[in-house]
Image: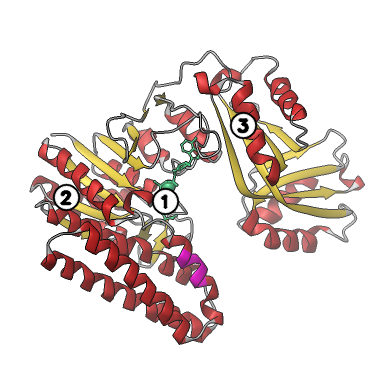
Amino acid sequence: MKKIVMKFGGTSVATGENIRRVATIVADSVNKDCRVVVVVSALAGVTNQLVEEAGQAKKKDEKQIQEFTRKLVEKHVATAAKAIENKSIQKEVEQVIEKTVSALEKVLTGICYVGEITPKSKDYVMSFGERLSAPIVWGALRDLKLKTEFFTGKEAGIVTDDNFGEASPLMNVTTHQVKGRLEPLLEKNVVPVVTGYIAATQDGVVTTLGRGGSDYTATILSVALAADEVWIWTDVDGIMTTDPKIVQSAKMLPQLSYGEAAEMAIFGAKAMHPSALEPVTEACIPVRIRNLFNPENHGTLIADGQEVKSKEVVKAVAIIKDVAMINIRGAAMVGAPGSYSKIFDVLGKNNINIMMVSTAVSEANISLIIRRNLLGRALSTLEIALLGGGLVNEITSEDDVCVIAAMGANMKGTLGVASRIFTAMAQKKINIRMIAQGSSELNISFVVKEEDGEAAIQAIHKEFKLDQI
Ligand code: ADP
Ligand code: ASP
Ligand code: MG
């Protein structure tokens, strides 16, 4: 019997109608004698609302918080009413929703009284989106007469470190616990519905796996349960040559190796969470990205030895929008051993990840790319540590930039790729702010103003004829 972990993203559970689609797809597989574990994201937009509310709660009063939670109940109850026909199941799901939201209201009120939000309490607030969507999917499956039970990531047994906001799984304990809790259910043909994105530390404190983390939940569970495949259901046909919302003629890539898919995910192809491929790569579990609204299409298969066969050197192009650039200038950095390590050390100690680095041979200048939300913290720590010591004269930043990455394993040793890319940029009069190419030559990344980002993507897609791949 085939064991499949299926993850349904935010758009897949955005409406009651979509949730019925989800339930039908799960029922089809179960009726074909597959054992299915379901992982669900929050309804589209809900995690963003929770982030916003968590940030605002300290400035709000109880009335405003109640207004927010009332709307949240309304939205989920309305969705459940459309997703589930059976009235008594509907009622049961409604009660779960109300009870869950009342717990959320207590936390938000707490934050409002204390006037402070910590990474720990923020994760707890953000966990509620999935805690509200999973019971609706559970109800819709029962509506179709499937045997099912729902779990939070914590209840399913996923244990992580305490890096709140971006926690990593501890696979040994997780495997042991998940197997113990879910395997007996699968053997009895019960479909476990597990909240994506959320887990807990060994002490039981709720953590999240980073934005888009439901993909990660699915691959973690697949490894723990030694599943045959993972299916990531989303709103596009698979992993494409670029974001189809930017270039309509973007083509689906039918197969990718784990390495290629990870490279694409890291460089901004949202269809997959960047860390999600780590567990399955080691365990060699194939992952399929599929379209809930076009299930006849088999989607993109990510597996060993599935490299894209393409005549062109560039196979895909991606954009990362929420980044900022820091420029550090200092004549004394020239030939001073250890000057870069000081910069990296300061940022590393403050948990600020550097996504891209570029320097000139003259060494009087170094440019860094980091996540935009960390810019304020990065600048103040760098200024305190570096200015006034004689090494650095000036630190400036730009927060209206984006990274464009052109990817493809065939780039290695091929001449002229960079010149084709940069000529295409020049023709569109797009100014390049920074360039980096790792020695692996799997991608060329560069930075442009955010307003030029989409035009840059379109120009590269055209130059390498990616719509004819
Ligand atoms: P989900 O809610 O299902 O997790 P996401 O919004 O996280 O969905 O990811 C799917 C979206 O990723 C698509 O709608 C598409 O606009 C975007 N996307 C960006 N780059 C790519 C790409 N190269 N291939 C496919 N989708 C991409
Ligand atoms: N709901 C979470 C988010 O929006 C996780 C996910 O959708 O994968 O980031
Ligand atoms: Mg996603």
**CB of mark 1 near ligand 2 (< 8 Å):** yes
Could you classify mark 2 by the number of other residues whose Cα lies within 10 Å: few (under 14), some (14-19), or many (20 or more)? many
The mark found on residue 191 in the picture is 2
Helix, strand or loop at mark 2: strand
Q: Is residue 252 above or below residue 166?
A: above
Camera-side mark, 1 or 3: 3
The stretch of residues the image draws in magenta is 49-54
Give the residue displayed 63% in from the left and 54% down from the top: 352
**Residue 94, percent from left and from top:** 22, 70
The mark found on residue 458 in the picture is 3
Q: In the rendered structure, which amino acid carries the disc numbered 2?
A: Val
Mark 1 and mark 2 residues within 8 Å of each other at the beta carbon: no
Secondary structure of the magenta portion, mostly? helix
Residue 50 lies in the magenta stretch: yes
- How far is disc 2 from disc 3 in space, using C-alphas? 43 Å
Residue assigned mark 1? 213
- How far is disc 1 from disc 2 in space, using C-alphas? 21 Å
Colour scheme: secondary structure
**Residue 28, percent from left and from top:** 16, 39
Question: Image check: 23 left or right of 351?
Answer: left
- Name the N-terminal-most of marks 1 and 3: 1
Helix, strand or loop at mark 1: loop
**CB of mark 2 near ligand 1 (< 8 Å):** no
Q: In the rendered structure, which amino acid carries the disc numbered 3?
A: Gln
